[in-house]
Amino acid sequence: MAIEVRPATRFADVQTMVGPKRPDANVCWCLSYRIPSKENLALSGTARGERVKELCREDPPPGVIAYDGDEVVGWAGVHPRADTGFATNRRIPHVDDLDVWSVWCIRVRPGHRGQGISHTLLEGAVAFARENGAPAIEGYPVDNKGEKVDLTMAYVGTRALFLKAGFRKAADTTSVLNGFPRILMRLDLR
């Protein structure tokens, strides 16, 4: 298996990973952390997908997509923290004044899980941030201490996933997801 991770410039591929089965459904589209909360709450139905389509045309796009050949198998939301909800999130601290990037969502399609694709996606997100001049990249995974994480909440990743990619714990947070505390993990890219 040769998984390739590329910038998420093709809307159809992002839609495959984070879009709803019904275009008018009010699902996340991975916008919850990417755009201001007020805008996120105001968007509904097909407007959510249209907003993602706009983000895919921006430079840089809203994340990265993993491919197995031509098949879309994964997604990671990654962008400068200043452009995300983490810029003003009171539960996730700022470690310093660096213009860090955030990776907030890692998803692997059913049927492709358990093959290490999340590790490849995180590596691809790091490479994407580095190629776009990020001095460091952060993630906010759960510190589940090896316990099972509900699949619907596993999108933030686990401490072990980030440790394996070379990140280190930089701070505690006051955020809790699925009963597990979230921690701030960081990787210096300089």
Image: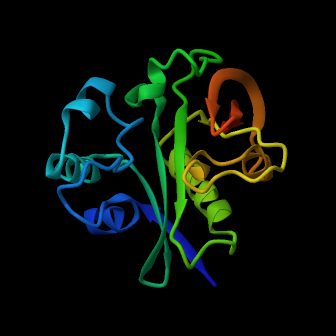
The answer to which quarter of the image holds residue 42 is top left
Q: Is residue 141 above or below residue 157?
A: above
Q: Nearer the viewer, residue 66 or 90?
A: 90
Residue at horizontal 63 percent and vertical 40 percent from the top = 178
Of residues 90 and 181, the one nearer the viewer is: 181
The residue that appears at 41% across and 31% down in the rendered structure is: 84
Whole-percent x, y for residue 19 in the image:
32, 60
Instruction: In the rendered view, tell whether residue 99 sits above or below residue 116.
Output: above
- The front one of 35 and 60 is 35
Left or right placement of residue 12 versus residue 92 in this view:
left
Q: Dividing the picture into quarters, in which one does residue 10 lie? A: bottom left
Number of marks drawn: 0
Query: How far across and down, in percent of the image, does residue 85 sit?
Result: 42, 27
Q: Report the quarter where the N terminus lies.
A: bottom right
- In the rendering, at what x and y percent does residue 118 appear? 63, 62
Residue for point 55% across, 30% down: 100
Which quadrant of the figure has residue 190? top right
Residue 59, image x, y percentages: 31, 46
Q: Residue at 32%, 50% (x, y): give it.
A: 27
- Up-down: is 86 above or below 53? above
